Image (cartoon, helix red, strand yellow):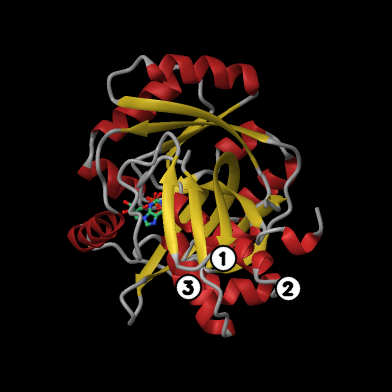
Amino acid sequence: MTSAMLGPPSVTVRAPAKVNLELRVGPRRKDGYHALSTVYQAVSLHDEVTVQVADDWGITITGSRALGVPADETNLALRAARTLADRYGVDEPVQILVDKEIPVAGGMAGGSSDAAAALVACDYAWGLGLTKDELGAVAATIGSDVPFLLHGGTAIGTGRGELITPVLTRGTFHWVLAAADIGLSTPDVYRHFDTIVEREERSVPAPAASMELMTALRSGDAQRLAAHLRNDLQEAAVELRPELGDVISSGLHFGALAGIVSGSGPTVAFLVADSESAIDLAVALAATRTVSETFRATGPVHGASVRGVARVD
Ligand code: ATP
């Protein structure tokens, strides 16, 4: 077969989930966003996003967690692809297939990661050859977490989370992610954070990453890292959904080194010592009433990266 007979390539990109090792929330800015300092880590729970140049734009969702994911223009992967096309004057529509494994609306940034993956896949499919910084600039217009999901690894996010600085880490950390079947929307959690601040008359300093956390990450010592995980939104999330407090207590009871609400929740991320402890904890938590599903994952892992390119007739 000659290459002239082949159709356009289909490009598949792996899109990782993330956990926030630290989420410090500062004052609300004039644009309505809160100033953040967060430390992200990409973990080994992935969606797969495949794009192929076609006659029309479109998106299809498959996989074990497809339920509730919009297959229309509001899907972040499709929005990212169309934004990239507009920005670079590309007139080649793509069909996007998202194979969904990351729990939806869980605080693990699955939608943002699909958007990052769509950018990487379209860049490849259209032969744009953009740098990470160029893709990152488009990513930041789609959502605050999207630049990190392009980047992967472990990184500090400032601004509203979109300004990324890589962090040096050693070794691999083991996580158990506990999904709870209790809806919790990101805007509601931020609103409740503001309510608590007002109610308690707290001052909210400008946020900054903790040096102890940086040192713990460099040491590769999970026990040390456990002592410095922090999420300023956790109190608000737990007040809104007290069941989350029970999930954290159960995880600690079953041997986790630490447990923290991931982002704005409702997923709880537990740090454990090694892969055996992860299996034990995942099994024990799965048997509790509030936890609907558990996942084991390790981090850090790469950001959105091309997994394969297939050329079909
Ligand atoms: P974050 O951690 O960034 O706050 P999240 O993990 O809480 O995000 P997502 O799974 O990214 O939440 O999705 C939140 C909402 O975004 C979904 O309920 C869905 O309606 C919408 N959405 C748009 N595109 C996608 C996508 N590709 N995958 C999942 N959800 C999407």
Label 1, label 3: how many angstroms apart (C-alpha)?
A: 17 Å
| Residue 50 marker | none
Residue on which the image places disc 2: 129
**Nearer to me, 235 or 49:** 49
Q: Give the foreground label among 2 and 1.
A: 2
Q: Amino acid at mark 3?
A: Arg
Residue 235 position, x and y percent, is: 31, 46
Q: Residue at x 55, y 61 (%)?
A: 118
Residue on which the image places disc 3: 82
Name the N-terminal-most of marks 2 and 1: 2
**Nearer to me, 79 or 236:** 79
Name the N-terminal-most of marks 3 and 2: 3
Residue 144 position, x and y percent, is: 46, 66
Q: Give the foreground label among 1 and 3.
A: 3
Q: Residue at x 29, y 59 (%)?
A: 190
Label 3, label 2: how many angstroms apart (C-alpha)?
A: 17 Å
> Position of 203 compared to 117: left or right?
left
Q: Amino acid at mark 1?
A: Pro
Q: Residues within 10 Å of mark 3 (few under 14, many from 20)?
A: many
Above-or-below relation of 75 to 253: below
Q: Secondary structure at mark 1?
A: helix
Q: Amino acid at mark 2?
A: Gly
| Residue 147 marker | 1
Label 2, label 1: how many angstroms apart (C-alpha)?
A: 17 Å
Q: Quadrant of residue 67?
A: top left
